[in-house]
Each structure stands twice: as structure tokens, then as C-alpha cells.
Image (spheres, helix red, strand yellow):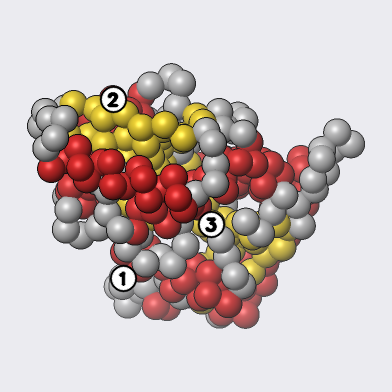
Amino acid sequence: MKKILIPTDFSVPAENAARYGLELAKGLKADVLLCNAIKVPADAPMAAQVAWPLMDYADLKREVTGDLDEMVKMLTDLSCSPEAEHCPDLSFEASAGTVCEVVSSLVKHRKIDLVVMGIAGAGGLTQFLLGSNSKEMIEKAESPVLFVPFEASFKKLRKIAFATDFGEQDIVSLQFIAELAQAFEAQITIVHITDKEVAPDGKLQNKIDAFLDRAALTINYPHIKFEYVWNIDIDNGLEWLAEQEHMDMVALCHRRHGLLGRIFRGSHTQKLSRHTKIPLLVFSQK
């Protein structure tokens, strides 16, 4: 893992995510790219109805670039302490477009391995920090996205839970998690949330065995174990999983159809984000 992308809107939750991403980069010996998606005021939906002085794009980009430069200096001071084993190279880029457009372009052209984003604090109207773009990013992202709750502070990863329904793409995701875990010598727990009994010779047990056999052949990492969580509702099961004190990160794959796809309907993902202080690593179908 070589490069981490951190979108920011300069808010406090975004700064918290940047600090978390920086510490993660130090452990992974990766570099960090900060980015800001510039939305020119004249393009805003209500621009025609609101009387306000409009800045032209050049001025707006100059302001954003200055803010990013200050943020890089602040993070560099944090990362390059004498005792640090690795001092990540920090750079920044500001581009016009939506968050999803800017992130997608940078992931493609700057060879990004992981995107780290902030989640705002708890509350009845909580949304992902970057608003409605979050679902679009999850659908279209070509790299994993780590959502960092505002309450989360970085600590060395010890245990990562990976919730799976044994899809084909989950092996690829597990490979990525193993690379992440290896840098911190973390334990990976593969978890399946189900409301069915697992009969010894039943279809589900056969599916579990096939998945674990393939994982053992594909992934060369010794600290992986499996358990299933019985829960009548996947949301409750994920919340229970996320609230376990010994878990430092929860990972899952998003598919439109399938068991885990349910949490991306309606407000389920936001609901999970409001109930956890644990970072949530999401893999899209891509």
C-alpha cells in the first residue's frame, strides 16, 4: 500500500480523519495526498436566488490551495517527530467538481490505494461528512474507502472484523485487509451475520468451508480466524460487532444485491455510523 487519499472540507471532523489517515500512513509506510473538491458558487443550485458576491474560480482555488498548504504543514509537524519510523510524504491537490468526481479522478490518475474520509458526530440528522456524495462514492469508488467517525482517535490496529456473506469479491477484499493488518500485526476475524442455524452438513456450512479453504490458499497471513454471529437483523448484528471494545476497525463489502447490500438502503449506513466510534472500511463492487 503506497498512497492514501484524504478528501477534506477543512471542518473539524475532516481534520480528525486526516490525523487518523496520517497515523495509518506512518504504520503502512505510505504517502498521503490531501484533496479538496472546489464547487464554484455560481454553479450552486440556489446561486440565482441568493444575492452574494461571487468569487471567480482562480481566486477560490487560490484560497483553497492556501488552506491545503497550511494543513500539510500542520500534519507534517505531527508526522515528522524524531521517534517516527516513517515520515509520510504529504502533498495536496484542489480541483473543480463534486467530491466523487475529484476523488475518482485522483484514484485513477494518482494510483491511490485507500481513501480516508470523516464522518460527522452523532445526531438525528447525521449524514456522512461529505453529504449525499458518500453513497455515490461507495457505488463508484475504485479503491476501498475508510470512514472515520469524529469520535475515533488512532490507536495501533490490533483487531479487525470483516463482515462477509462469502461473495466472490470478498476474497480480494480480504487480501487488502491482510495487507493492512500485516503492517500492524493485527488479528483478522472473518464474521458472518446470520439468523439461521448453521447445520454441520448444510449448505451454509459448505459455503463457509469453501470460502475459508480458498482464503487459506490465496492469502498468506496467519492471524485470521472465523466466527459467525447469530442475529435476527443484520443492522443489529453490525452494531453489536462495531460496539465490541476489542475491535479497532470493521470492514465489509457493498453489493446492491445480497445480505450486506441491505445496509446501504435507506438510512442504514448512517444509522451504523451514528452508533460506532470504530472506523468503517467499505469495499465497493469495483
Q: Where does the N terminus fall, quadrant-wise? A: bottom right
Residue 77 location (% of width, % of height): 80, 43
Residue type at numbered disc 1: Met
Residue 269 location (% of width, % of height): 27, 44
| Label 1 residue SS | loop
Q: Residue at coordinates 55% horizontally, 42% vertically from top-left?
A: 221
Residue tagged 3: 114
Q: Earlier in the sequence, mark 1 or mark 3?
A: 1
Left or right of residue 236, residue 286 in this image: right
| Label 3 residue SS | strand
Q: Earlier in the sequence, mark 2 or mark 3?
A: 3
Residue type at numbered disc 3: Leu
Residue tagged 2: 240
Residue tagged 1: 46
Q: Residue at coordinates 60% horizontally, 29% vertically from top-left?
A: 155
Left or right of residue 134, residue 198 in this image: left
Q: Residue at coordinates 62% horizontally, 65% vertically from top-left?
A: 64
Tell me the distance, in whole angstroms, between the alpha carbons under discs 1 and 3. 34 Å
Tell me the distance, in whole angstroms, between the alpha carbons under discs 2 and 3. 26 Å
Residue type at numbered disc 2: Trp
